[in-house]
Image (cartoon, coloured by chain):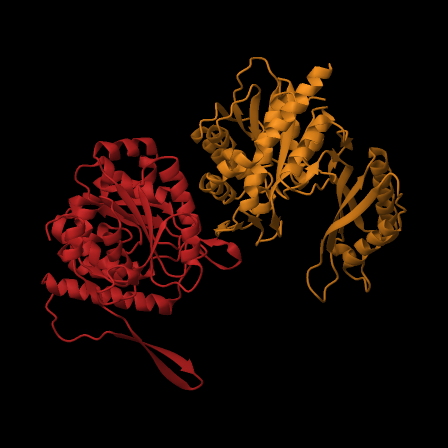
Chain colours: A red, B orange
Amino acid sequence: MDKDWIQSNTFHHSEFKDIDQAVKAKRKKKLSISLCLPTLNEEKTIAKEIVIIKSELMTRYPLIDEIVVIDSGSSDQTRKIARAYGVKVYLANDILPHLDKFKGKGENLWKALYVTHGDIIVYIDADIKNIHHRFAYGLLGPLLFSENIRFTKAFYERPIVSSENKLRSTGGGRVTELVTRPLFSIFMPELTQFLQPLSGEYAGYREIFEKIPFNIGYGVETGMLIDIYEKWGLHAMAQVDLDRRVHKNQDTRALGLMAFAVIKTFIRRANQLKKFDNHKKTFDEMIQYTRVGEIFQPEVHFIEQHERPPIFELPEYRKKFSKGG
Amino acid sequence: MESALYKRKNNMEKYIDDLPTFVDRIRKMREIIISNIVLLGQIPAPTFHEKRRAEYLVERFADFQVDECVIDGFGNPIGVIRGSAKNRKSIFVVAHLDSFSEVNDNLNYVVTDKTISGIAVADNSAAIGVLASLSEVFKQLGLSFKSDIVLVAPTQSLGRGNLKGIRQLLKNWQMPIRGAICLESVKLGRLNYYSDGMIRGEIHCSITSEISWGQHHPPNAILVINEVINEIMKLRLPQKPRTKIVIGKVRGGFNHGKDAYNAQIGFEIRSDTDKMVKVLYNDIQDIVYGINNAYAVELKLKRISNLNATSLAFGHPLVKCASKILHRINKEIVSEPSETALSIFLQRNIPAITLGVTHGENFHQEDSMIEIDPMFKGIAQIVALLMAIDNGVCDG
């Protein structure tokens, strides 16, 4: 196990605060950069994310070349508001419409590869309440200033918003600590060095993202981390401390669904990698119980486990990006 | 002499004619302006705890290449855009830095296509964000000034702060000041050029627990304070000079079934004349003294801030010029007395006015909100007025 990785490949966003230098590094490497915001009913946060990133990293410093919103079919004003700030907005179902349709964050991230043009893609969740441009330049720093690093992942101090607008300093990352970290510790201990393997913010070179499959739902981060680690190794990966991320807290039942998807993805990968041998049938339904009077009533949630193949395998993609399809 | 006046009038028309173009060009910078409002406004800055916001504002001034950026000895963040002429007076643009919030408040603003909402955005985060954006606005509009433009966000302005930041800054400012524009987030159309004489005070009633032991009918602090309020209400206020007493805060008690040990009210006396304010304050002092003796409780009166009545003449060129600008952007003018940094400038015989930046609602509530689009007119009015002052159009 490479125990030094956490020392050598962990960064703090403040190391990349000089955005002018980042722009110079980007120009020197002749790179273009796309930012993707996957959305589903994010009318309260989407505008702020677009406005701050656009102002600080497009208008003032030309670090990011395009911002793209990929929406899963919001029923609120998300798409209208995003369009008002002049970014490209797509309905996920309108991209590659001849393919089967799925709904989920991973689906949006995968389809973003088809509609964006950047050599580097930055993915940032659209529900961040304390968005700051450090979320983007922090993730981009190691990619631009290092020759080896091809993928960066965020970690945070994660306060959550409680009632009356006060902050509590802990509460995030329960699925990480109770599910992902124990699984990594047992089967892939090197990956435990990622302090928040499920964080929703990451960036990487297109050549990385286009060659890995994308789980369409909550399993996308787990699958992505394992696949990049297996294909390119730890030395191609880094993590960046982005300080604080304020987000809406989820209740335990909702986190249960997330944990289910993470475990399913992990089992699938572990089987493929022969980390353990379990080819018995597993189920795709998470069952939770609610007490109604004297009766415990089951709630069955079907959690779709579809996975998109590496987009590089798609003829349309290869044609669009001139990679000989 | 006539030709100078003619020239001045012509110049004024010129700046006013530029307004529609300014509005369109400023609108193109909306992301930068909104970012400044959000990034600065989300840092809590209650009075006496403005340090973090002050540091970030100075950082933003530096990011936008303001020539001199500093926090002075009183915690006021200052940015100076150097003018082309040497030894010219400077022009101040001022927006108070502190806001009604708590240090641990979660100030995450919500931005939509039309509005920005969140604690204190309407008092005074929007104005602070605009202040931070002004140097970039000048750059984008291709403007330069002969005078130094001094951008200041004074600390300790509200409540007990009693405008201490701006008082100290002006007391220590060595160079002559040609004029000042004070900014408040809302409301676009306000044109304040005078301030009332004012004293803010608090009356505390406390009853020690020893007094109440063994008494069947111990005094109740809330009832004592109620007596004070009744006596204040009996005071006769003249119609001229225009005078008002506002009882704006009340607090007291512990629970429903317990006599209150503590109670307090906050009040403000306002008048056209300082003399009347003093007379009424003395009357309230007498009321407090009398009730104190009658009830044998601990009743204390404390003055927390005061301002002198000051005014710029309505006919002053600065007021006239600002009025013309507001007419040109189709804004109805509302002039009321203002208890802001304005009065400190006027006390020092520096021509000054207060302008509003945009429209908004719920100024001091959690869902405080401002409208985005009117703000571009609000910024254009500031720019046009600065150009006018810089060219001598507003000299008295």
Q: Is residue B125 visible?
A: no
Q: Is residue A84 visible?
A: yes
Q: On the rendered structure, is B377 left or right of B315?
A: left
Q: Is residue A103 left or right of residue B235?
A: left
User: Which quadrant, please, contains the C terminus of chain B?
Assistant: top right
Would residue A306 be found to the left or right of residue B336 on screen? left
Where's residue A189, x and y in %?
18, 54
Rendered image quadrant of residue A24: top left
Image quadrant assignment for residue A111: bottom left
* B215 or B243, nearer to the observer: B243
Q: B337 or B357: which is nearer to us? A: B357
Q: Is residue A66 left or right of residue A318?
A: right
Look at the picture and state if A306 lies above or below B74. Answer: below
B377 vs A256, nearest the viewer: B377
Seen at 59% across and 13% down, the residue is: B87
Q: Is residue A212 positioned above or below B80 on the image?
A: below
> How far across and how far down the image is residue B111, in percent?
48, 50
- Vertical arrangement, residue A52 with respect to residue B173, above or below: below
**x and y percentages locating residue A238 in the rendered image:** 23, 45
| Residue drawn at the location 16% of the way across and 44% of the way down | A235
Residue A159 x/y as whole percent: 41, 53
**Is B366 in front, or is B256?**
B366
